Image (tube, rainbow, N blue to C red):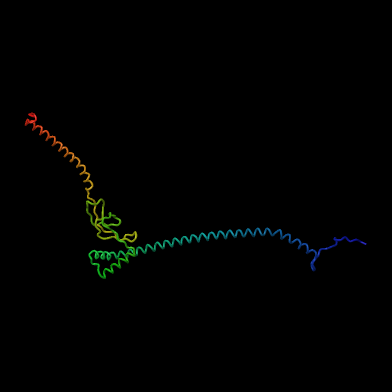
Amino acid sequence: MTEETPGFDEKPDVPSGATPDDAEPKAAAPSSEEGAAPAGDASENAGLVAQLDQVRTALNERTADLQRLQAEYQNYRRRVERDRVAVKEVAVANLLSELLPVVDDIGRAREHGELVGGFKSVAESLETVIAKMGLQQFGKEGEPFDPTIHEALMHSYAPDVTETTCVAILQPGYRIGERTIRPARVAVAEPQPGAQTAKPAEENTGAPADSAENDGTAGNGGNAGNAGTAGNKESGGPDEG
């Protein structure tokens, strides 16, 4: 009898319909796939990082474009608003300039007491409307002459002024805000040419006159005393006494 060694004659299980040679490649295939998997994941991650960087760059560029566009739009809005205000001011100034002769007639009628009845109501309504539009009157007697807002139509000299002064308002001026529509037409007076130099001269000449008077008085007194002494000597009164 022959003894059988257990384990040496056993064969691996082979599926039905397959040969023993097919079992070995299938067993080795998983090990090769496991070794190639980490390399594929690294390349895929590198590609994703590159795409992410491109997206971030594009996003930053679009954000900068949007910010620049918004800044340009804000500047455009401010410029349009400034131009709109300037055009409005010019239009209002042109309208009120055409109404100034009417306002002057109303002022003259008020000065002469002719602003009565319905004409008075119309005039007051017109003055209220132009005041709401920003029209302001300026120009008063006694204020210093300013060539930027005053127009001198008459000139004279006066001893009671120390600088060029508006002594009469021939036609009031009007402005809207800082814009002067019409300067005030005035009569100006200047100080007398020699008024300031004459006073020191009088003060200087007054002192010698006083000293002369004092000298004259003292001289007259001395002469009078000498004359009295001489008269007494001639009469012999003191000698006889």
Query: Which residue appears farthest toward the left when viewing the image?
Result: 235
Residue 185 lies in quadrant: bottom left
Query: Which residue appears farthest toward the right when viewing the image?
Result: 1
Give the percent coordinates (x, y) of residue 14: 80, 65
Give the percent coordinates (x, y) of residue 240: 7, 29
Is 61 or 196 nearer to us in this picture?
A: 196
Classify residue 158 as left or right of residue 88.
left
Give the percent coordinates (x, y) of residue 224: 11, 35
Residue 213 sits above or below residue 184 on the image: above
Residue 160 sits above or below residue 217 on the image: below
Q: In this figure, what is the number of numbered marks?
A: 0
Q: Residue at x 26, y 54 (%)?
A: 165
Classify residue 183 as left or right of residue 211.
right
Query: Which residue appears farthest toward the bottom when viewing the image?
Result: 118
Classify residue 119 as left or right of residue 89.
left
Q: Name the quarter where the C terminus is drawn.
A: top left
Is 19 or 183 nearer to us in this picture?
A: 183
Classify residue 107 as left or right of residue 60.
left
Give the percent coordinates (x, y) of residue 203: 21, 43
Q: Residue at x 78, y 63 (%)?
A: 23
Is 143 or 98 nearer to us in this picture?
A: 143
Residue 115 lies in quadrant: bottom left
Residue 98 lies in quadrant: bottom left
Q: Name the quarter where the N terminus is drawn.
A: bottom right
Is 226 or 166 nearer to us in this picture?
A: 226
